[in-house]
Image (cartoon, helix red, strand yellow):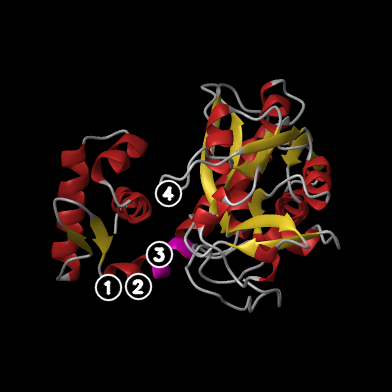
Amino acid sequence: MERYEIETFLTLADELHFARTAERLRVSPGRVSQTVKALERRVGGPLFERTSRRVALTPVGRRLREDLLPAYRQIQRAVADATAAYAGVRGALRVGFTTPWCGELLIKAGDAFTARHPDCTVEPLYVTYNSAVTALRKKRVDLLVAALPVEESDVVAGPVLFSEERALVVPAGHPLARRATVSAEALAELPLVTAAGVSKAFGESFFPTRTPGGLPIEHGPAAGGWQGILSMVGAGKGATVATVAAGRYYVRPDVAYVPFDDAEPVDYALMWRTGDRPSGLSALIRTVVELAPPAGRSSCGCEGAGAPGPRQCQGCGGGR
C-alpha cells in the first residue's frame, strides 16, 4: 500500500464522512472516493458500507484499521522523533487540565514525552473550567484537555480523547439520591445550580433550560468553581450536572451522583491555539493521543461510556 492510500483509508475510517476526510487531507472528495475504490479492488471486497445517510466500516475494514493503525502511528512517531532531534525540542510546555482524570492522562503523556525529548519538560497546571479556555488563549498554557463544546475561533478543538457519562448531582437527602439512574426529565424536579463564567455553548450543554420532553428547567444560584457548586447542592439549593467520574474523585457526604440513563456523554478533547505552535507541541499532542483510552472507553478504561442502562464499571470498580 502507498502512504496516501493508508492515510486516506485511516482518515475516512476516523471521520466516516467523505467531505470531512477530503478537507483533512486537502484533496477533493472524488480523490478520496477513487483511492478507496482502488484499495477495495486490491483487497477484493468493500471496506466501507456507503448509503445516502451514513458511511460505516465493514468487518474487514474494521480489522484492517486495527492492523494498520498501530504501525502507522509508529511510523509517524519515528519520523516526528527524527525531526525533533534536528529541530532541537527543548524548553517547557505548559499543559492545562480541568479534572483529575484529565490530569492523570497528561502526566502520563508528559512522562512518555520527556523520555523521548529529555531537553523539553512538561508542566501540568490545574485550571477551573470557567477559566480554562481563557488560560489557553492568553498563553498561560500551551495545550489543554477539557470538556467540549468550545466555540472560540482562535482555539482548535482537536481529537476527543475519551467520554464520560453524565450524572445528576443532587442533595444526599433528596428522593432522587436513592435512584440507580435518572432520566433527563428529572432536571425539571429541582432548581439547577449553574456554573458562572462559562461560555454560552458550554452552559447550554450542561445547564439546559428545558428537558428533552419540553419541561421547563428552573435555574437556581450560580457559583464560580466546582467546590462552590457542590457546596450549593449539598446545602439543598438545587441539583447540578456533572460526570459519573466526578463522583469517584469528589466524594462528599452531602451530595449524591446519579447517572443519567438517556443523556449523551461528555466528550473531553485536546485544545490548542491557532497559528504557530511552540516547539514540540505537535509531538506532545501525538503522545497524548497515543496514550488516550481506546475509542468508546472512559478515562478509567471502562467500556461503553454513555450507553444506557445501569452498569458496573469494570475498570475502576465504581457504579456506572
Question: Where residue 60 is drawn, which disc sits there?
Answer: 1
The residue under label 3 is 68
The residue depicted at 62 percent of the width and 73 percent of the height is 180
Decide whether the magenta segment is chiefly helix, strand or loop: helix
| Circle 2 Cα neighbour tier, 10 Å, few/some/many (<14 / 14–19 / ≥20) | few
* 3D distance between C-alphas at marks 2 and 3: 9 Å
Disc 3 residue crowd, few under 14, some 14–19, many 20+, Cα 10 Å: some
Which mark is first along the chain, 1 or 3?
1
Q: Secondary structure at mark 1?
A: helix
Q: Which mark is nearer the camera, 4 or 3?
A: 4
Q: Mark 3 or mark 1, which is nearer to you? A: 1
- Disc 1 + disc 2, Cβ < 8 Å: yes
Say whether residue 148 is visible.
no
Mark in the foreground, 4 or 2:
4
Q: Earlier in the sequence, mark 4 or mark 2?
A: 2
Q: Which residue is mark 4?
A: 212
Cα separation, mark 4 vs mark 1, equals 38 Å
Question: Which one is earlier in the sequence, the residue at label 4 or at label 1?
Answer: 1
Residue 145 in the image, given as x and y percentages of width and height: 66, 43
Magenta segment: does it hold 65? no
Identify the residue position indicated by label 2 in the image. 63
At 15% from the left edge and 70% from the top edge, which residue is drawn? Answer: 45
- Residue 107, percent across and down? 77, 52
Residue found at x 76% / y 37%: 128
Q: Closest to the observer: 251 or 149?
A: 251
Numbered label tally: 4
- Give the amino acid at mark 1: Val
